[in-house]
Image: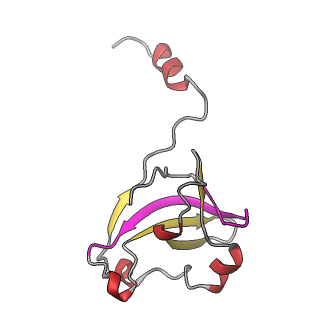
Amino acid sequence: MTFDIRQYDTVFTADGSELGTAMSLYIRPDADPEHRDFDQYLMVLRLEEADEYYIPTNFIDAQASETGQVRLSLTMAEIEESNLKRRPPFIERGEANEEALANAPSPVPGEEEIANRQRPPA
């Protein structure tokens, strides 16, 4: 499954609560669907509590997500009742492939173009 998630996108729960900030994607190379293994996890950082959440990408609502905002299909209560704050064992053991998320585009339109004009010629 492919997602257009950028680093520092804001992640929201299904009930509209802000969970945190998208930081990186972990891919499990040996996921076994028969054992209900998830193959990709989005690491979300919640700065207020310095909590990390590891959200299986199966719980990302791709249709409700938009640029700069990631929507989950889980409510905040479901997340708090789950073990999604625990780093999955395959990540702990170093068996995950960490994929950096693309950097978020500049929030100011044309900022890069302006910066390039202000640079002295080489």
Q: Is residue 16 magenta?
A: yes
**In what quadrant of the picture does the N terminus appear?**
bottom left
Identify the residue at the far top of this view.
121
**In magenta stretch: residue 93:** no
User: Residue 36 lies in what quarter of the image?
Assistant: bottom left
Q: Viewer-proximal residue, 47 or 104? A: 104
The picture places residue 20, in percent across and down from the top left corner, at 63, 62
Question: What residue lies at 62% left-to-right and 72% top-to-bottom?
Answer: 74
Q: Is residue 7 above or below residue 108?
A: below
- Which residue shows up at 53% across the image and 18% down it? 114
Residue at 73%, 64% (x, y): give it: 17
Where residue 33 appears, x then y in whole percent? 34, 81
**Does 76 sit left or right of 32 as displayed?**
right
Vertical order, 51 against 37 (above or below): above
Q: Residue furthest bottom?
A: 35
Image quadrant where residue 81 sits: bottom right
Residue interval drawn in magenta? 10-29
